[in-house]
Image (spheres, helix red, strand yellow):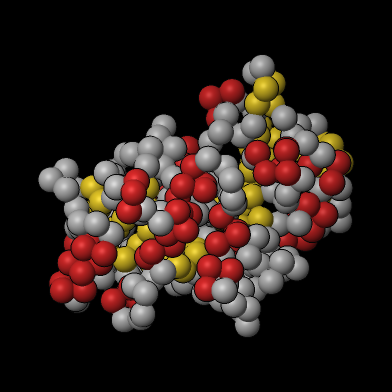
């Protein structure tokens, strides 16, 4: 399997402490991880600097035998000491889960041997996106079963996207758009807020609206691979069945970077503040992931 460096400085690949932490030994250009038998080939290319997990499937899908996962050494690994990102290439390509570095060989061997499926990793990750991590269980785990459908690419934008995935409640959809300030003629909501009327705790969501039945029943894990490379899309918020059935019109927000495909379910009034904080690097995605049996900070 490939171990891809996606973090570079002056054209040089940065690995942080990962190559020591995973406990492997060299056999030529391959790392053999302990007694697990898992084998990784570290690869470097400056063109992959800041490569996102959702863009990996398109990178490795051209011909030949495609491995079930690819491992990324990305910015959270190099600068945050986080575990490597495992990117699914088989079940729902583009979604990710982080693995504790010291357990990487064990986890990869279990995946290759059929003892674990990628869905198992997703179901058992903590709020930080780490498989069997100790950060608390998400209150709203991401769905793991694929729909068996393919979807077109989402629009390219450096802002946020609001994507409708449920089409059973037209009135509810119109009410949601009205609550977000209404869509303008170009299909954007929240792009011209009144500073005097803006609640900084509930900053309006500025997002490009995608109202297209081609995205009906789109799952969060399928979103990262639909984001075109190049633009740094802040987040994707899904207006799904939950949005039209529960108080507060909750949106399912999808992480595109730290753990692609991870979800945070938030009242629509909070998502704008989330987008702003992510854009300026003031908060991380996991800070908006509600934990089981704990009241979210935004409801306190």
Q: Residue furthest left?
A: 185
Residue at image coords 26%, 64%? 179
Foreground: 93 or 181? 181
| Residue 67 in view of the camera | no
Q: Does residue 149 appear left or right of residue 258 in this picture?
A: left
Q: Position of residue 258 (x, y in %)?
A: 58, 49
Q: Position of residue 30 (x, y in %)?
A: 76, 37
Above or below residue 97? Residue 250 is: below
Foreground: 295 or 44? 295
Q: Does residue 168 appear left or right of residue 111 in this picture?
A: left
Q: Position of residue 289 (x, y in %)?
A: 56, 65
Q: Position of residue 51 (x, y in %)?
A: 53, 36
Residue at image coords 26%, 70%? 166
Above or below residue 240? Residue 34 is: above
Residue at image coords 60%, 59%? 286
Within the image, what quadrant is residue 230 found in? top left
Above or below residue 142? Residue 152 is: above
Q: Does residue 235 appear left or right of residue 163 in this picture?
A: right
């Amino acid at each position: 399997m490939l171990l891809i460096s996606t973090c570079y400085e002056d054209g040089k690949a940065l690995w942080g402490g990962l190559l020591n932490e995973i406990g492997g030994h060299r056999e030529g250009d391959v790392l053999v991880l302990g007694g697990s038998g898992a084998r990784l080939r570290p690869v470097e290319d400056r063109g992959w600097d800041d490569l996102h997990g959702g863009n990996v499937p398109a990178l490795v899908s051209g011909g030949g035998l495609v491995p079930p996962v690819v491992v990324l050494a990305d910015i959270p690994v190099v600068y945050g000491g986080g575990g490597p990102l495992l990117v699914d290439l088989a079940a729902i390509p583009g979604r990710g889960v982080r693995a504790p570095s010291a357990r990487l060989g064990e986890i990869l061997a279990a995946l290759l041997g059929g003892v674990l499926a990628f869905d198992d990793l997703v179901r058992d990750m903590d709020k930080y996106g780490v498989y069997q991590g100790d950060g608390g269980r998400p209150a709203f785990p991401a769905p793991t079963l694929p729909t068996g459908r393919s979807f077109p690419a989402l629009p390219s934008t450096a802002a946020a996207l609001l994507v409708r995935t449920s089409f059973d409640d037209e009135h509810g959809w119109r009410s949601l758009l009205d609550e977000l300030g209404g869509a303008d003629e170009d299909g954007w909501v929240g792009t011209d807020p009144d500073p005097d009327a803006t609640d900084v705790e509930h900053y309006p969501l500025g997002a490009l609206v995608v109202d297209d039945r081609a995205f009906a029943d789109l799952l969060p894990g399928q979103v990262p691979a639909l984001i075109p490379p190049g633009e740094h899309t802040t987040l994707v918020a899904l207006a799904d069945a939950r949005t039209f059935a529960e108080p507060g019109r909750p949106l399912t927000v999808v992480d595109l970077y730290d753990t692609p495909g991870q979800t945070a379910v938030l009242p629509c009034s909070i998502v704008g503040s989330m987008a702003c904080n992510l854009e300026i690097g003031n908060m991380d995605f996991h800070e908006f992931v509600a934990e089981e049996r704990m009241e979210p900070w935004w409801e306190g």
